[in-house]
Image: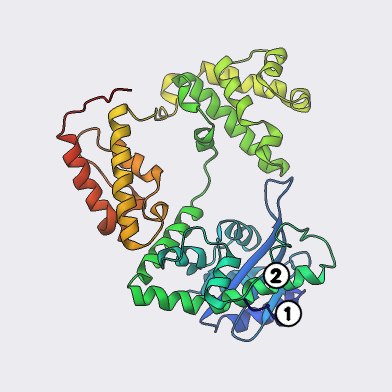
């Protein structure tokens, strides 16, 4: 492995300089981008640095000094410039929070590497070592990016991320082109942006609470309402959800429906929440219990039946076999959640592929899975002896 040698960065510390460089980036065929942020005790990520590499230089944008992000928003909207990230889910959140835009068109190099047969969830350091033969340090991943001045080590780490990412993109693009899979990556990145671009609905967050399906229909409505309140409070206070109320306490409130402060305490609420928020929470619970049934949400899915569980196992085997043939990770081809959704869709004997199995996956695995389920449905189910 070679030792990395990164260039000195160009610092972008004013609105005027950001505008100047953004005008140049609009004529680049692709840009490599990354973000550094802190998210220890806040709901929203606190941006500490944005890195950009073009065909000339590497740039470090200081978000603590920039107030006008519209020039970068224009770059993000420019469809002639490909924006390349690595494992970009959290980066997208930072970009949207700063600029109000998502970068499009988007390429995620981790996704590209997976589709090119290089392995699943490949870290940036490993990918650089694999394709460029360079060993990068990892020490600064969790450092404090809000401190000023940044250390020399932090600066080198931040520059290396985009300097080498800019070099990786054409190699990954060529590999996918040679394999006839470039459109696979385009579809997946477009789907990622579409999913990320959907407005979060606080009314859906109760679905993420573990064992929520065990609650009765009315209790699920109570859970939904207190989860909505928690989501609003976490965003307003800019604290993690668990700092407001943890999931276990939400579940306990829905199941046992406390009617006074003492019962709220037994549900697991922290002292400061009881002191400030008990009256409001008790009111939310009372109103939820008084609401008519037509306001209750759709009942959450229960675990699959034994027969459907057997079908799930068999669909996983088909996915694993096909993934091996394609030399991609099984979870990239079809995730468990998609397989469960497919099986649940066949209550009337007509299965429907979920959106995540559309596009290139429909031919590669979606259609074979539909054929498999049609065959399985014709076979009598025999419960295995334990």
Give percent across and percent down for residue 40: 73, 48
The quadrant in which residue 100 appears is: bottom right
Q: Position of residue 221 (x, y in %)?
A: 50, 24
Q: Position of residue 50 (x, y in %)?
A: 68, 68
Marks 2 and 1 close (CB-CB < 8 Å):
yes
The answer to whether residue 366 is above or below residue 182 is: above
- Look at mark 2 in the image and give the residue it sits on: 158
Q: Is residue 228 left or right of residue 178?
A: right
For residue 269, which numbered disc appears in the image? none
In this rendered view, identify the residue nearer to me: 268 or 292.
268
Q: Which residue is drawn at 56% across and 80% down?
A: 26
Q: Is residue 200 visible?
A: yes
Quarter in which the N terminus is drawn: bottom right
For image coordinates 32% across by 73% down, the residue present is 180
Q: 113 or 348, which is in the foreground?
A: 113
**Eyeballing the image, is 173 above or below 254?**
below
Q: In this view, does 37 lie above or below 62?
A: above
The coloring applied to the image is: rainbow
Which disc, if any, is residue 9?
1
Label 2, label 1: how far apart the Cα atoms are: 9 Å
User: In this rendering, would 363 be left or right of 241?
Assistant: left
Q: In this view, does 155 lie above or below 300?
A: below
Which label's residue is closer to the chain start, 2 or 1?
1
Q: What element carries label 1?
A: loop
Residue at 42% x, 78% y is 174
Query: In the structure shown, which secondary structural element does the residue marked by tag 2 occupy?
Result: helix
Q: How crowded is mark 1: few (under 14 residues within 10 Å), some or many (20 or more)?
A: many
Q: At 51% across and 76% down in the image, what residue appears?
A: 169
Mark 2 residue crowding within 10 angstroms, few (<14) / some (14–19) / many (20+):
many
């Amino acid at each position: 492995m070679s030792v990395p040698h990164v260039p000195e960065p160009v610092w972008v510390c004013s609105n005027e300089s950001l505008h100047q460089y953004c005008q140049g980036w609009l004529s680049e065929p692709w840009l490599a981008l990354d973000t550094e942020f802190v998210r220890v005790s806040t709901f929203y990520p606190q941006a500490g640095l944005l890195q950009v590499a073009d065909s000339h230089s590497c740039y470090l944008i200081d978000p603590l000094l920039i107030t006008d992000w519209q020039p970068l928003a224009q770059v993000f909207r420019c469809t002639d410039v490909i924006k390349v990230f690595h494992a970009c889910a959290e980066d997208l959140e930072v970009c949207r929070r700063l600029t109000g835009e998502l970068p499009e068109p988007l390429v995620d190099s981790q996704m590209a590497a997976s589709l090119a047969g290089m392995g699943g969830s490949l870290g940036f350091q490993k990918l650089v070592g694999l394709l460029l033969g360079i060993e990068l340090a990892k020490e600064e991943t969790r450092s404090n990016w809000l401190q000023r001045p940044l250390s020399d080590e932090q600066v080198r780490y931040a520059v290396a991320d985009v300097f080498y990412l800019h070099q990786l993109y054409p190699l990954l693009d060529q590999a996918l082109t040679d394999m006839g899979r470039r459109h696979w990556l385009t579809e997946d990145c477009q789907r990622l942006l579409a999913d990320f671009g959907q407005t979060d609905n606080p009314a859906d967050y109760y679905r993420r609470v573990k064992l929520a399906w065990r609650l009765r229909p009315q209790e699920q409505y109570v859970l939904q309402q207190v989860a909505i309140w928690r989501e609003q409070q976490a965003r307003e206070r800019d604290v993690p959800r668990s700092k407001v109320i943890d999931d276990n306490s939400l579940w306990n409130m829905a199941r046992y429906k406390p009617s006074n402060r003492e019962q709220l305490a037994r549900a697991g609420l922290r002292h400061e929440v009881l002191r400030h928020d008990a009256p409001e929470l008790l009111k939310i619970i009372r109103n939820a219990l008084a609401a008519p049934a037509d306001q209750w949400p759709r009942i959450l899915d229960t675990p699959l039946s034994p027969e459907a569980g057997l079908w799930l196992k068999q669909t996983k085997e088909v996915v694993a076999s096909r993934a091996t043939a394609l030399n991609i990770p099984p979870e990239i081809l079809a995730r468990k959640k998609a397989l469960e959704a497919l099986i649940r869709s066949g209550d009337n004997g007509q299965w429907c592929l979920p959106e995540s199995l559309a596009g290139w996956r429909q031919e590669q695995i979606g259609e074979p899975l539909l054929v498999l389920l049609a065959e399985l449905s014709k076979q009598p189910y025999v419960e295995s002896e334990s």
